[in-house]
Image (cartoon, rainbow, N blue to C red):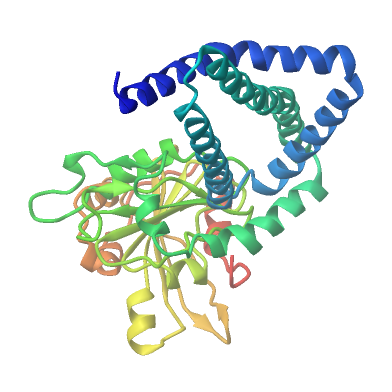
Amino acid sequence: MSDFGQHLENELSVTGKVIAGAPSAIWNEISNDWQNDKGKLAERGLISAGIGFAATVALRRSPVVAGLIGTGLLAVQGIRGLVATGQLFGDAWDANTAAERDAVAKSADAGIGKEGALWAETLPGMIAGGGLAKYAANRSALLESIGTKFTIGAEFPARKLPGMERLMYRAPGSFALPEDIVAADGRVDALKLSDILAEKTPWKGVEAARSVNISDAAVSQMRATTALPGTAEDVNLGFYDKPGRILFHTHEPAWGPRPSKFDIESTDSLGIIQSGEKTAFYSGHLRQLISSGDRNPPLRALILDKGQQRAFVVDSLLKNDAWTDAVPKYVDYSKATEMLKGLDLSKVSESIGSLPASTADNFTNIADLLPDLEIAMPRPLFR
């Protein structure tokens, strides 16, 4: 046999022995810890549970940071694995006898046993700690506040990193839109789109946002990004809205879907807000802000209450840095839904403003009007 053939046989033989011996090496290491060092097992369990608890409190609404940390850990583990593999192949190269091969395989299995046992002994604690954190955070204002501060201080800036915008259109939870969302003349079925987005983005205690690509060539197809969570009162995608896209996010049902000044300034043409059974379709002001620096956007939104089959328009202006009073202008519900099914994104404000007034009496008493009035009346400027 040639020298190379001998070396190759050595490598294959040792590799086979390592693979065959790895499961028992891991089990033997775990058994040894259980029989001889229960204190170490308990310590590892408590530490891993604490890590799982703390990580979940901080990261449960910070998917980008969690992904970056996970990628970093995998990279470190991958490098360690490559180094160990290189060491194994180097030692096996000249292991020409059965005894030498057994010794190399035994040494490698010893390392695999320690590494595998460490993961097996710590992973249950991390999972348990994470589960406890989810339960506790939903019932503790302090833990919720910690998570909120982390989301604002670390997650929102991380979403601005290069490449994140494109990644969000392919990340788990993103999805392609049906072809019939856009007609041949470029008009958008905003009503159907809002139904799809509302179904896929239910309220979970904090606002969540998606960017929806309709015709921006920077994204290869009509897609919605994964839903990015925020806080109870704010959400930030990390990148600007653009022509050919639609901005969608949720509001707490108790607040209603009225857009804030920030919402309007962050939206290029059409924005959609879902709040309970009510949906707001509003005209964005980002293009004017960029071109002229105008920071006094008008508010024009169509509020659709699909449960009550009711629609009204809210028009308001900024005066002395506050919204002026606005009274709901009730419009024909069927005309409003018809308009939304074929909306020209370049004429969102004009389309909403041209809706005819409602001629139907959908109210049995004044109490029916109160939720609509609450949406229309002025709120804090940035809500």
Query: Hey, which residue is sitting farthest left in the picture?
Result: 184
Left or right: residue 380 compared with residue 249: right
User: Is 98 placed above or below 362 here?
Assistant: above
Can residue 330 be spotted in the picture? no
Quadrant in which residue 80 is drawn: top right
Q: Is residue 107 left or right of residue 332?
A: right
Out of 358 and 198, give the one closest to the viewer: 198
Q: Quadrant of the N terminus?
A: top left
**In the rendering, at what x and y percent does residue 275 appear?**
51, 47
Judging depth in this view, the residue of 16 and 81 nearest the camera is: 16
Q: Nearer the viewer, residue 228 or 31?
A: 31
100 vs 279: above or below:
above
Image point (56%, 61%), residue name: 156
> Residue 332, how many percent across, how many down?
30, 51
Vertical relation: 226 (above or below) 151 = above
Residue 225 vs residue 155, the one in the foreground: 155
Percent position (x, y) of residue 3?
33, 27
In the rendered view of the protein, which quadrant contains the C terminus? Answer: bottom right
The mark tally for this picture is 0
- State the image quarter where residue 284 is shown: bottom left
Res 327 seen here: yes
x and y percentages locating residue 55 in the rendered image: 70, 44
Q: Quadrant of residue 365?
A: top right
Residue located 42% across and 41% down the image: 198
